[in-house]
Amino acid sequence: MTALLRALVPRACLCALLCAVLLAATPGFSSEHAVRTDTALSGAVAETASGRGLAPRPVDFVVLVDESGSLSTEDVRREKEAASLLALGEVSDNSRAAVVGFGSSAPGGAGPVDVVCGLTELNGTGRDTVDGCTDRLAKRTKAQGQGTDFPAAIASAVDLLNSAHGDRPKLVFLLTDGKLDVSDDVAYGPDAGSRKRASERALTEELASARRNGVQLWPLGFGKSLDQAQLKRIAAGGFQGGCADSSTTPAFASVSSAEDVNQALLLAFGRARCARVGQMVTETVDGNADLEVTIPPIATDGSISVVKQDPRSVRVTYFDPKGHEVRLGAAAGTSFQLSGQSGRVESLRIRDPLPGTWRVHVETTRGSQRVSAVALWQGVLRTALVLDPPSPRPGQRVVARMRLMTRAGTVLGAKDLSGVRASFRMSGDGIGNDVIVGARDDGRGGDRTSGDGEFTARMAVPADASGKLRVYGSMSSPGVVGDRRPYSTSVQQGAPSLKASIVLGSRAAHPGQSITGSVQVTNTGSAARTLHLTAVDVPFATHFVLTPQRVRVAAGAQTSLTFTMAFGEHAPTGLVPGRIRVRDDAGAVVTESFLGVKLTTPPPWWERYAWPIGVGVAALAFLVFLVVVRRRDRSRQLETAGLTLVLNQDGAEVSRLRAPPGRSREFSFAVISSRGSSSQLVNADSGPRHRVRRLLDGRIEVRRPEGRPLYIPRNGSVPLGGGLALSFTDTRGVQPGPKPRRAPGTAGRRPQERRAGRGRDSTTGRSAGSGRRTAPSQARVDPSADQSYDDAF
């Protein structure tokens, strides 16, 4: 066993070190199938497309604020806050807003409406202007007309919206605590009955006008005196178009008190302008507090609005999801603009916000203050489409695929797109009615992977299609709108001579790595063809390089062409947008495919080299095991257990002494003799004594009291003087040769064998193990024991 261990230990150590060093030194070694590249590949840099042109569609809206006599001062204050919330929280700087107060006409008094703020563009200064206008809203006195003239208010809003040109959505938000009441307005008739009938006819006419002019009406009632049937009629009477999501049809909403107007009006506003509104968070703050609002990854534009009880006593600071304090302007791809800091409502508008939880830190200086915070956001998404085959024949079935991404190029996954419904629409030359087909992301019907954020649909090209062909992707979801970029191609006649498909290997990599793919090509034509590979819509920040950019396909060949996609060391993580496109010499698209590559943060070195480190650790553990086994084996080899010392006198055995049991590597003995008896071996723990140890070569070493060593080989003996000789037997090894004869006069008598006992040391006359001295004349002196020995041996 010792020899085997001596051979294995150095070899195991060397193998372990070589294995670990070689594997750790392998470039790009990781658990991924990608190959690491430390230098940029030469070749064609990707074509890129910017999403900077994507922005929330602007809207024009009017806020109609009830100023009738039934309102309390607190009700009016809440209405002012609600109007400011819409103006300041609107996500587009190009939108326009107006604020109109209304009541009823009174003899000699003002008219039924009061345009406190005309249609104003909501740029930086315009927002503050509209916010300031709301201060002019006030509860009407009887002389001013305290009724509720809905027809006059709606007519005023429609006129304001029609004064602005363009095809923007036109929205009216009506705040009221009651019902149509013009009982004191002589303009509607001489008595209450005629006035009621006339006002109803006027309302019907104004609702029809709103419908004709494309004006949506969103009434919001608060309090206990509402005529809900009438307000629902108003909502249904205006224009019913809206966002692609059917839930955005104008509807009546009501709340129990003016305290809930802000949240309710924001929700209606969000639905009307195709945005989403989070839950309003309200706290009573005495000192400081943090209010949290959430903006999801799908949002491209948003605002965080804060309503303050006393603006002079409240200071607000904003922190992004990474914990950084917001600084106005642009930073790290996100831009900020703040309005209304000195008013009751302030709003932080955010372009390309970081997704996650935003913190609104509030500090108060004058006692307890009631503060609310709410987020409004919209996702303006780009659609990326591919068609297979890219140039279909009339009547051919094609597979359309669509991915959605943010303005910044972030490709959205299934989790971000929860609730989104997608579809495709095909139009073109010769096609009478557009072909509309719903898309799916469930792994069926041509969809490759369920829940990967890629929407798929199978469509049949109409048999009468000819010339140009356009395919649009659309989506519907609350708070999400998409662009209208079509996939433009041409219908071809006859079967193509060149067919191709793109196959990607691994779809996962780290920044700085490259992955490979292949183009499976069949050229049935009689001439060789050249294919051009390009990357489309890949963000520049990825430093994407595609090689090669040109390949040659022989006539009649069916082959597989390999290409490499490399990503820069500092490429952002996430799903990489863009497509790989293959064109022929004429520029026609032969095939294309989404990249679908997800870049992830490189793991730390201990994870990246986990396998070689594991091998090294295992080898080291095995090495330690071998060393421990060897040391234990060596230690056991040197244990004295199993040894028996044999003392011979004049060639005859006179005494035996067995080593004490246990794992001791040394034991001591003395040779004593007394008058009339043979010399004996006895254990000795002190005084002049001999010390015995094993040697690895099978011998034993006996150190005499004066320190001189004696080496006794197996089957051998050494003289001690005076006719005495010492040998040994070993139950763990080969026993000595023939049994020695007994001394004369000891026939029939068993030799004295001792493991422990008492006798007299032949050199001192002292009884072994005791302090009593015997007479010198009664002891035989061992000539080899002349001094004591007590070193560390």
Image: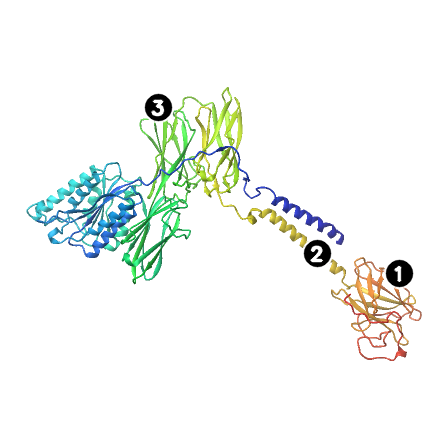
> 334 or 662, which lies in front?
334
Give the labeled residue for mark 1: 738
Residue 676 in which image quadrant: bottom right
- Percent x, y of residue 497: 47, 22
Could you tell me the amino acid type at mark 1? Pro
How much space separates mark 1 and mark 3, taking CA atoms?
116 Å
- Percent x, y of residue 367: 30, 63
**Residue at 9% across / 45% down in the picture?**
187
Position above or below: 757 against 282: below
Closest to the camera, between mark 3 and mark 2, is 2
Closest to the camera, between mark 1 and mark 3, is 3
Could you tell me the amino acid type at mark 3? Asp
Quadrant (top left, top right, bottom left, bottom right) of the C terminus = bottom right
> 49 or 574, which lies in front?
49
> 518 or 330, which lies in front?
330
Give the labeled residue for mark 3: 464
**Circle 1 SS class:** loop
Query: Which mark sits nearer the N-terminus, 1 or 2?
Result: 2
Could you tell me the amino acid type at mark 2? Val
Is residue 366 in view from this perspective? yes
Position above or below: 354 against 672: above
Q: Is residue 773 left or right of residue 417?
A: right
Give the labeled residue for mark 2: 629
Query: Which mark sits nearer the N-terminus, 3 or 2?
Result: 3
Residue 659 in which image quadrant: bottom right
**Circle 3 SS class:** loop
**Residue at 36% across / 29% down in the picture?**
470
Residue 577 in which image quadrant: top left
Query: Within 10 Å of the Cα at label 2, are there few (<14), some (14-19), or many (20+) other Cα atoms?
Result: some
- Percent x, y of residue 169: 26, 39
The dot on residue 614 is: none
